[in-house]
Image (tube, rainbow, N blue to C red):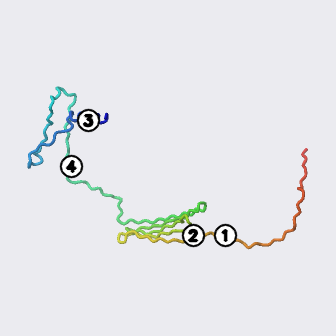
């Protein structure tokens, strides 16, 4: 409720200050230059002296011709090529990408190892005629095969276990 009272008091103060003008009064069919604005009709007497006088607002006409910003860095035939490859033996992360652009035609491919161990490779092209097209290939997981040598039979002589062999050392 207090907020409503503050908003109402602010509106009354703005109206008393003359910031909100009266509606436009004009004759129908009159040209735009002939339209005038009437002073607000107030039902109270104006104060005898004011400590300030609001300055009249002046508006400049908009320029007839707008300036057009020209991008000086625009390249009508952009070209680039990049690639990267990550092979991290510690984490097993394996991914890479290559891409080239010549004008509006982009070609590239990227690959990565998915959590299930399969390698996904995506080859893509993009141009203004055909749009974006991608072909996805999946290679099955290749498990690392450890080479195990055939067991070798070794003949050992029997070992006799006895009391531990140690001697006391005297330092003197």
Of badges 2 and 3, the one in the foreground is 3
Instruction: Give residue 172's quadrant in the image.
Output: top right
Measured in 3D between alpha carbons, the distance from the residue under mark 2 to the one under mark 3, in whole angstroms, is 73 Å
* Residue 137 in the image: above or below residue 7: below
Residue at label 2?
A: 141
Measured in 3D between alpha carbons, the distance from the residue under mark 3 to the one under mark 1, in whole angstroms, is 84 Å
**47 sits left or right of 76 in the view:** left
The answer to which of marks 4 and 2 sits earlier in the sequence is 4
83 or 155: nearer the viewer: 155
Picture residue at 12% right of the left edge, 42% below the top: 25
The answer to which of marks 4 and 1 sits earlier in the sequence is 4
Residue at label 4?
A: 62
Measured in 3D between alpha carbons, the distance from the residue under mark 4 to the one under mark 3, in whole angstroms, is 36 Å
Q: Secondary structure at mark 1?
A: loop
- Which corner quadrant holds the N terminus? top left
Residue at label 1?
A: 146
Measured in 3D between alpha carbons, the distance from the residue under mark 4 to the one under mark 1, in whole angstroms, is 80 Å
Instruction: Give residue 100's quadrant in the image.
Output: bottom left
- Residue 8, disc: 3
Q: Residue 139 location in percent, x, y? A: 54, 71
The answer to which of marks 2 and 3 sits earlier in the sequence is 3
Measured in 3D between alpha carbons, the distance from the residue under mark 2 to the one under mark 1, in whole angstroms, is 15 Å
């Amino acid at each position: 409720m207090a907020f409503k009272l503050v908003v109402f008091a602010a509106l009354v103060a703005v109206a008393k200050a003359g910031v909100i003008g009266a509606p436009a009064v004009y004759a129908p069919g009159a040209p735009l230059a002939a339209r005038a604005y009437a002073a607000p009709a107030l039902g109270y007497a104006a104060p005898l002296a004011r400590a300030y006088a609001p300055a009249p607002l002046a508006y400049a006409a908009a320029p007839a011709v707008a300036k057009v910003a020209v991008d000086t860095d625009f390249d009508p035939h952009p070209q680039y090529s990049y690639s990267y490859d990550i092979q991290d033996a510690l984490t097993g992360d394996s991914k890479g990408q290559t891409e080239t652009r010549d004008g509006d035609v982009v070609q590239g491919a990227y690959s990565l190892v998915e959590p299930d161990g399969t390698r996904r490779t995506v080859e893509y092209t993009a141009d203004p005629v055909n749009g974006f097209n991608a072909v996805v290939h999946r290679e099955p997981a290749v498990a690392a095969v450890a080479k195990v040598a055939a067991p070798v039979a070794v003949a050992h002589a029997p070992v006799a276990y006895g009391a531990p062999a140690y001697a006391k050392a005297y330092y003197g």
